[in-house]
Image (tube, rainbow, N blue to C red):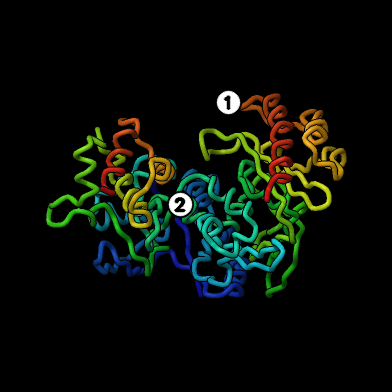
C-alpha cells in the first residue's frame, strides 16, 4: 500500500451517498462547507475548542475541524441541514426559537447537533446532564441559560 | 485552515502500519487526531505521511484480565473507557476519562494518542505511572517489546515509542485502590496540577503538569509506607513541593504548583484508600 495525496471518497451525508475527490490535507469541515455547500456547519475557532463545527459522525458527536475529509471514506455524517424537513423546524430547533436560545446564532448548528446526540441517548436529561453534554460547545452570547432551557423543554 | 500537503494511508493490519511507519521518514500514526490535526494546523508538527490506524480493530477495546488487571488497546477512545464494561473492572479509568475535555473529544481521542503525545498536562500519563502500567510497542518486522511506565515517558511530546514504531496496548497489573486529584482550568479543563495514586501494599504516586514527564513522589511514598491514615499521609506530603521544579505561567506560579502538588498528592492517596 502506497500513501496517497488525494483519494476519491464515498460518504453518506444526510442520507445521500456522495463520491468526491479530496486532498489528504482537506479538513472535513471544509469538505462539507466548500465542496458540498453545506454551510450550516460553522468554523468558529478552527482549533477544536469551540464546537461550532460539530457534526454527527458514524452516530457519534465529533468536531469536523479535527477530522480530515479523507478519513471519512465510508463514514455516515449528519449535519445541521438534516434536522429540518421541507423547511419545517424539528422540535429541538423550534424549542431553541421559542426559548430565545440564540442571539448571533453562530454556535447554534453545533449546539443543535450536541443536543441531538444527547436526546437520542437520553430523552429526558437533567440540567446537569445537559450542561455536561454541551461542554464542548462555546456560546459567547446567551450565557447558556436559554440553551439549557430549550433542550430541557424538548423532553416534554 | 489549509494544512501543509501530506500523504495518507489507511493500513488494514498492524504489520502493514508498522511497515509504512518505518518505510517513510516523517510518517506519523494518526489515531483520533484530537491533538495531531491541531498541531498540523499550527505547523508545530508537519508529518509527510499520515498512517491512519482507524481500521486496526485489534487495537480497539479493553480486556478484563481479572483482579482489576486490564489490557487497553491503544485505539480505545476515552468514551469507550467510560462506557466499556471491561474497563469497569478498574473504575479509575472511566472516572478520569470522563473528565477529559468534552463529548466530542472523548468520542474521538484515544488512550494511545493521549500517552504518545505526552503533553505534560495530559491526564493519562501520571495515571498510568501510578498504576504501574506496561506499554507494548511493535517495531519493524513485527518485533514486540514492553516498556514499564516509569521508562515510557521520555520528554515533552516524546516517549519510548520511537519513529517507525507503534504502541499497541497498555497493560494494567492487578489492583483497584486508586485515586486521582486535580486542579484544572475550568471544569474538566487542562490540568494545572494532576496527581494519581495507587495503593498496592505501598503507595505509588505520580504527579502531572510539574515537569516534562510524570514525576514519582518517591520520598512521600517511602514516608507513607503502609500507614494510610489521614495524619500520616498529610505529614508525608509535607515538603513534597520543595522537591519539584514546576513551570510558572499565566495560570499558576511555580510556587502555587508546588503547593498544589502536596495538597493533591495527599487527596489522591486518601481517595485511593477510601475506594470501595
- Sequence-first tag of 1 and 2: 2
Extreme residue toward the front, this view:
B276
Could you say whether the residue bearing mark 2 is in a helix, strand or loop?
Answer: loop
In the image: residue B20, left or right of residue A38: right
In the image: residue B269, left or right of residue B182: right
Q: Which residue is mark 2?
A: B4
Coordinates of residue A78 in the picture (x, y in percent): 30, 58
Q: Which residue is mark 1?
A: B250
Q: Chain of mark 1?
A: B
Coordinates of residue B125 in the picture (x, y in percent): 67, 49
Q: Residue at x 69, y 61 (%)?
A: B68
Q: Report if the CB atoms under discs 1 and 2 are less than 8 Å apart.
A: no
Instruction: Identify which residue, A57 or B67, lies in the foreground.
Output: B67
Instruction: Identify which residue, B47 or B91, lies in the foreground.
Output: B91
Residue A107 vertical position relative to residue B231 in the rendered view, above or below: below
Instruction: Report, in whole angstroms, how far the alpha carbon at label 1 lies from the one at label 2.
Output: 31 Å
Q: State which quadrant residue B169 falls in.
A: bottom right
Residue A60 vertical position relative to residue B35 in the rendered view, above or below: below
Coordinates of residue B11 in the picture (x, y in percent): 52, 72
Return the mark for residue A7.
Answer: none
Q: Residue at x 59, y 52 (%)?
A: B114
Instruction: Identify which residue, B77 or B226, lies in the foreground.
Output: B226
Amino acid at each position: 500500500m502506497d500513501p496517497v495525496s488525494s483519494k476519491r471518497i464515498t460518504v453518506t451525508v444526510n442520507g445521500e451517498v456522495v463520491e468526491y475527490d479530496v486532498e489528504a490535507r482537506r479538513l472535513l469541515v471544509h469538505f462539507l462547507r466548500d465542496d458540498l455547500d453545506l454551510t450550516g456547519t460553522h468554523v468558529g475557532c478552527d482549533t477544536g475548542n469551540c464546537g461550532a463545527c460539530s457534526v454527527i459522525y458514524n452516530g457519534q458527536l465529533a468536531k469536523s475541524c479535527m477530522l480530515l475529509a479523507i478519513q471519512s471514506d465510508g463514514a455516515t455524517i449528519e449535519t445541521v441541514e438534516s434536522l429540518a424537513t421541507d423547511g419545517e423546524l424539528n422540535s429541538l430547533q423550534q424549542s431553541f426559537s421559542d426559548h430565545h436560545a440564540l442571539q448571533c446564532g453562530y454556535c447554534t448548528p453545533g449546539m443543535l447537533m450536541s443536543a441531538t446526540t444527547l436526546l437520542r441517548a437520553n430523552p429526558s436529561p437533567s440540567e446537569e446532564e445537559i450542561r455536561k453534554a454541551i461542554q464542548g460547545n462555546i456560546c459567547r452570547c446567551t450565557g447558556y441559560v436559554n440553551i439549557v432551557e430549550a433542550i430541557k423543554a424538548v423532553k416534554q | 485552515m489549509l494544512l501543509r500537503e501530506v500523504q495518507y494511508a489507511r493500513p488494514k493490519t498492524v504489520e502493514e502500519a508498522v511497515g509504512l511507519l518505518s518505510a517513510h521518514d516523517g510518517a506519523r500514526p494518526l489515531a483520533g487526531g484530537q491533538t495531531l490535526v491541531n498541531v498540523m494546523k499550527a505547523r508545530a508538527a508537519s508529518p509527510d505521511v499520515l498512517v491512519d490506524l482507524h481500521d486496526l480493530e485489534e487495537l480497539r477495546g479493553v480486556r478484563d484480565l481479572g483482579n482489576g488487571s486490564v489490557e487497553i488497546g491503544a485505539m480505545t477512545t476515552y468514551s469507550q473507557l467510560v462506557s466499556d464494561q471491561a474497563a469497569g473492572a478498574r473504575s479509575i479509568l472511566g472516572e478520569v476519562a470522563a473528565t477529559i475535555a468534552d463529548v466530542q473529544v472523548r468520542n474521538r481521542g484515544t488512550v494511545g494518542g493521549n500517552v504518545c503525545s505526552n503533553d505534560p498536562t495530559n491526564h493519562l500519563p501520571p495515571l498510568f505511572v501510578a498504576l504501574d502500567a506496561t506499554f507494548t510497542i511493535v517495531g519493524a518486522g513485527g518485533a514486540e517489546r514492553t516498556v514499564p511506565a516509569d521508562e515510557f515517558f521520555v520528554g515533552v511530546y516524546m516517549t519510548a515509542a520511537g519513529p517507525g514504531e507503534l504502541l499497541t496496548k497498555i497493560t494494567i497489573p492487578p489492583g483497584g485502590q486508586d485515586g486521582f486529584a486535580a486542579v484544572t482550568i475550568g471544569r474538566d479543563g487542562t490540568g494545572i496540577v494532576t496527581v494519581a495514586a495507587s495503593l498496592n501494599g505501598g503507595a505509588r504516586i505520580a504527579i502531572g503538569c510539574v515537569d516534562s514527564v510524570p514525576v514519582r513522589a518517591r520520598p512521600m511514598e517511602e514516608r507513607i509506607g503502609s500507614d494510610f491514615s489521614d495524619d500520616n499521609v498529610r505529614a508525608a506530603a509535607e515538603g513534597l513541593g520543595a522537591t519539584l521544579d514546576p513551570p510558572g505561567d499565566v495560570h499558576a506560579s511555580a510556587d502555587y504548583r508546588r503547593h498544589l502538588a502536596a495538597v493533591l498528592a495527599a487527596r489522591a492517596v486518601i481517595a485511593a484508600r477510601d475506594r470501595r
